[in-house]
Image: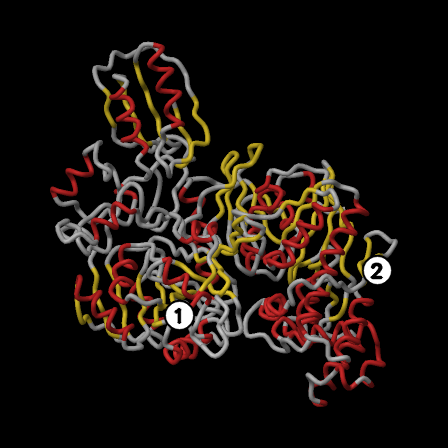
Amino acid sequence: MVVRGAVQGVGFRPFVYRLAKELTLRGWVVNSAQGVCIEVEAAPDRLAEFARRLPLEKPVRAIIQSCETSHLDPLGCDAFQIRESTDHGDKSALILPDIATCEDCLREVFDPRDRRFRYPFTNCTNCGPRFSIIETLPYDRANTAMKNFAMCADCAAEYRDPANRRFHAEPTACPRCGPQLQFWDSLGKVLACADAALRHAAEAIRTGKILALKGLGGFQLLVDARNAAAVQRLRDRKHRAEKPFAVMFPTPEQAGADCEISELEEGLLTSPEAPIVLLQRTQRTKGSPLLGGEGRVRAIPDAVAPGNPNLGAMLPYTPLHHLLLRELDFPVVATSGNLSDEPICIDEHEALARLGDIADGFLVHDRPIVRHVDDSIVRVIHEREMLLRRARGYAPLPITLRHPQPMVLALGAHLKNAVALSVERNVFVSQHIGDLATKQAHDAFTRSVADLPRLYETRPEVIAHDLNPDYLSTKHASQLPGRKAPVQHHWAHIASCMAENEVEPPLLGVAWDGTGYGVDGTIWGGEFFLVEENSCRRFAHLRTFGLPGGDTAVKEPRRSALGLLYEIFGDELWEQSDLLTSFSSAELRPLSRMLMRRINSPATSSAGRLFDGVAALARIRDRSTFEGQAAMELEFAIEPDTEESYTFSLGDGSPIVIDWEPALRALIEDRRRNMSAGRIAARFHNMLADVVVALAQRAAKAQVVLSGGCFQNRYLTERVIEQLRANGFQPFWQQRIPPNDGGIALGQVYLATSAMRELT
C-alpha cells in the first residue's frame, strides 16, 4: 500500500504502527520519497478492517490524496515494525507547512516541572517547523536544518518510541541538546543567552525599543503596539509611511478589545495555520478615545493602521512568541524584518547588516532557516476565508488538478510574486516571494525558482511566464532550459480561480486588477473573458484612458483622474479649473502635453486605475504611499445601506466596451454639489457590481469566475456575488490561492500546456 499526500511529519507512521498492533497485523511502514509505504500480512477480514480505518482515524494534520493497494505473496513477517526512510524513486510526497504550537507543547513550555519549561523551540509531530527547515525529501532529521543538533538521551528515547507523540518528530529538541537564544545589541555584541536573552528582549520592547526577532521563517520587527511614538519610530526607520502594520496579541480576548471577531475569524486566528486575519476595529465611544464596544479598552493607536477601519491581527504561533508575549502581556507590532520592497532576512548576520539601522536589539538563535516564509494574511469574504498572502501555514500544500500535467515551472508575476511547479496532478505553489523591485527581491526569486525543482528532483519540461517582456520573471524564463509558454496576465488570473474551484468551461471570467500586459501591447486590467471548451476570447473591457507619466500614475491617483477627465472633456478640460485643484499650474503644463500628444501616456483599461481616479475625484486620496491605498480608502469610505448606483453604457462591438463616462459625469456633478465621499464611493461600487451582472446577462453563461486584486475588496466582491446569485448565476471566487498576483503562477501552470492558452 502506498499512501500519498501530506503524510510525513504528522505522526502518520506511529498511527499506522498502533493500528497495526491493535489488529495484530505483521509487516512494516516506511517513509519514502512518494509518501508512506505499508506492507501488512493478516487474514483478509483484518486487512479489510485496516484499510477501512486508515483514512477514518488518520492524524488530524494528515491529508491523504490517494491510497494505492496491491496484493502480494506473504513474506512471513513475525511482527510489525517501522523501517528507516528511503529516498528511491520519483519524489512526490507533500511537504507540510509550518504549524503553530499545539496545546500539549504549550502546556509543557509553561509547566515548571517539565524538562522543556520555558524552552522556545519545543515541538512534536503535531506542530512546529516543517517547510522552513526542510532541505530535501524524504522529511527526515538528516534532511533538515536540525541535522547538526545531536539529540540527548531523553530526546532520542522519545524519538524512537512509537507510543510517544515525539516519535520521529524531526525538529524535536530540548534545552540540553537543541537550539539556543542569544540577545545582541545593534552592533552584534552578545548581551545575554538562553532564557536571559528572552527577558532582555522583553525589556527592550517594554521600554519602547525596536526588536528584531529571528522567528520561524525569518526575522520580524517588534515594537510595543500601544506606544504611538515607538510605532512612528519604526515607520521612519523602515521607510513605511502609512501602510498598516500587523499586531500580535497575547490572547484572543485581548484582540477582542480592539477588534470585532466573528466565530469564523476566531477559528482562523486560533487555527494551526495561525495567519494574520484582517478584522474590523471596534468603534470608539464618543468622548472616550480609547474605549471600544461594550466598554472594552482599545490598546492600539491609529498610528498602527492610519485611517484604516481594519486591523491585521494574529496570535503567538511559536513557543518563542508565546513566551515573549506572556512576558509582556500586551500587544506588539509584528512586521516583516526588511526594508520596503525587500524580502525578509533569514540569517542573523544578514539581519545585522540589513536591519542594523532599524532595530535596537536582536533576539537570535542558532537553528538555520532554509527558506524565508512570511506570515500569511487572510480576510473573511462572504463567510469564507480568502488568502491575500499565502505563506506560513499554507505553503507549499498543493492545489490538485483533475488531470495530470507535464512538469511545468511557472514564474508568476512581477508584483506579489510566487512560483509554482506541477508534479503529476499536484501544483505546488511557493510561499509569497514579494515584489521583484530590488536586487534582494530578485535574488530571493531566483532561489525560489530553483527551490521547488530541487526539492522534488525534477527537470521542468515547460517554463510558463507572463507576456510582459520587461518583467524580471519573463527575462529569467529565457535563461532556463525547457519549452517556453507565455501566458497573458489576466487569463492566468481566471485560470487560477478555475483550477482552485475545479470549474470547467463554458463560463464568463472577470479579471480586474491594476496592471497587466495585454496581447495588443496596451495595459489591461478591466477584463471579461468568454471561456469555451477549447478557446478563450476577450469578451469585454472597460473603456481605455491615458495614464500621464505611466507608472508614476500608480503612486499618484490624481494622474489617473486627470487621464479619465481628459478622455471625457478633451482639450476643454484645461478650462475647468475646479476639477484640476490637485495640481499646480507648473505640474499641469507637462502633464497636459503628455495627454494631448499621447506621449508617455499609455492607454489602459485597468479597473485598479479607475478606482484610483475615482478616489482622487472624490477627494479621498491624491497620492499613495503604498500599492492599493487609494482603492482601499475608497472602499473604507462607503456609506452603508446606500443602494444608489451610477449608470454606464455597453457598446455593441466585439469586444464590448464598458463606458464609464456617464458615471463619471454624474460623479463630477455630485462633487460640485459637495456630496459626501462615502455616498460617491457607494454609488461607484454599486455600479461596478451592476456592470458584472449586465455582462453576465450578455454572455449568457451560468458560471462566472471572479479574480484579480480588485476582488480583495470585501464590499465589491460580496455585492457582486449576491447580485449574480440573485440573477441566477453561479459565481466562483478564490479562497486558498490569492486573487491578486500571488495566484498568477497557478494559472500559468494550468494554461501552459492547454489549447486555451492563446487568447482569440
**Residue ID for mark 2:** 649
Residue at the outermost front position:
294
Count of numbered circles on the image:
2
Nearer to us in this view, 114 or 504 = 114
| Numbered badge on residue 297 | 1
At 17% from the left edge and 62% from the top edge, which residue is drawn? 195
In the image, is 51 to the left or to the right of 733?
left
Element type where label 2 sits in the image? strand
Q: CA distance from mark 2 to mark 1?
A: 49 Å
Where is residue 734 drawn, in percent x and y? 58, 48
Residue 391, image x and y in percent?
44, 53
Binning the other alpha carbons within 10 Å of mark 2 as few (below 14), some (14 to 19) or many (20 upward) gives some
Q: Quadrant of residue 151?
A: top left
Any part of residue 478 in sight = no
Image quarter (top left, top right, bottom left or bottom right) of the N terminus: top left
The answer to whether 12 is drawn above or below residue 517 in the figure is above
Q: Is residue 153 above or below residue 554?
A: above
Q: Residue at left 33%, top 71%?
A: 353
Q: How is the image coloured?
A: secondary structure
Question: On the rendered structure, is 481 left or right of 455?
Answer: right
Element carrying mark 1: loop
Q: Nearer the viewer, residue 206 or 609?
A: 206
How busy is the neighbourhood of tag 1: few (under 14 within 10 Å), some, or many (20 plus)?
some
- Lower sequence index among marks 2 and 1: 1
The three-letter amino acid code for the residue at tag 1 is Val
Where residue 651 appears, x then y in whole percent? 86, 57
Can you see residue 524? yes
